Image (cartoon, rainbow, N blue to C red):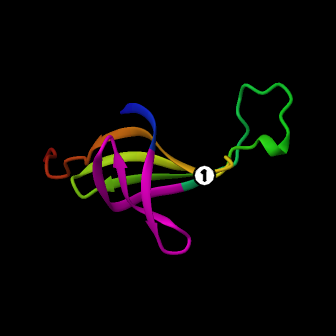
Amino acid sequence: MAFIGEVIEVETEGEPKRPTRFVWRGRSYRIEHILASWHDASMPNQLRRPRWTMRRHRNYYHVQTDGGERFEIYLDRGKKRPEWVLLRSLGPEPDRTSGSD
């Protein structure tokens, strides 16, 4: 796994909106599978006196591209203008053909 933490452009479709493609560093990635998704409305840890308005509002996705690469991306809905972030690379698709007999 490698931390990235960069804002990216994302294309979505459907209701609710699901990511279908993203652009990172000038390269386009087509999302072949959404492996997992979840919502995070937790409080940032460093706050001494948190208020409910300070909650995170993020939708996370583990995705696999058509090239077999896996990434964790999220939509940060807590900003005035929502933005997508490529959080980290999860590495290539695990090789399911190699195994021990």
Q: Position of residue 27 (x, y in %)?
A: 27, 47
Provide the major secondary structure of the magenta segment.
strand
Is residue 24 highlighted in magenta? yes
Q: Residue at x 23, y 52 (%)?
A: 68
Q: Quadrant of residue 52?
A: top right
Question: Looking at this view, is 84 or 81 the one in front?
Answer: 81
Q: Which residues are magenta?
A: 8-37
Q: Is residue 24 above or below residue 4?
A: below
Q: Quadrant of residue 72?
A: top left
Q: Position of residue 31 (x, y in %)?
A: 33, 59
Callout 1, which amino acid? Pro
Q: Residue at x 48, y 65 (%)?
A: 18
Q: Residue at x 71, y 43 (%)?
A: 42
Q: Position of residue 100 (x, y in %)?
A: 15, 44
Q: Position of residue 90 (x, y in %)?
A: 35, 40
Q: Is residue 28 left or right of residue 37?
A: left
Question: Looking at this view, is 100 or 60 the one in front?
Answer: 60
Q: Is residue 50 above or below residue 24?
A: above
Q: Is residue 101 above or below residue 47?
A: below
Q: Is residue 18 left or right of residue 48?
A: left
Question: Looking at this view, is 47 or 79 the one in front?
Answer: 79
Circle 1 sits on which residue? 82
Is residue 46 highlighted in magenta? no
Q: Residues within 10 Å of mark 1 (few under 14, many from 20)?
A: few
Q: Residue at x 43, y 56 (%)?
A: 10
State the quadrant of the N terminus.
top left
Q: Secondary structure at mark 1?
A: loop
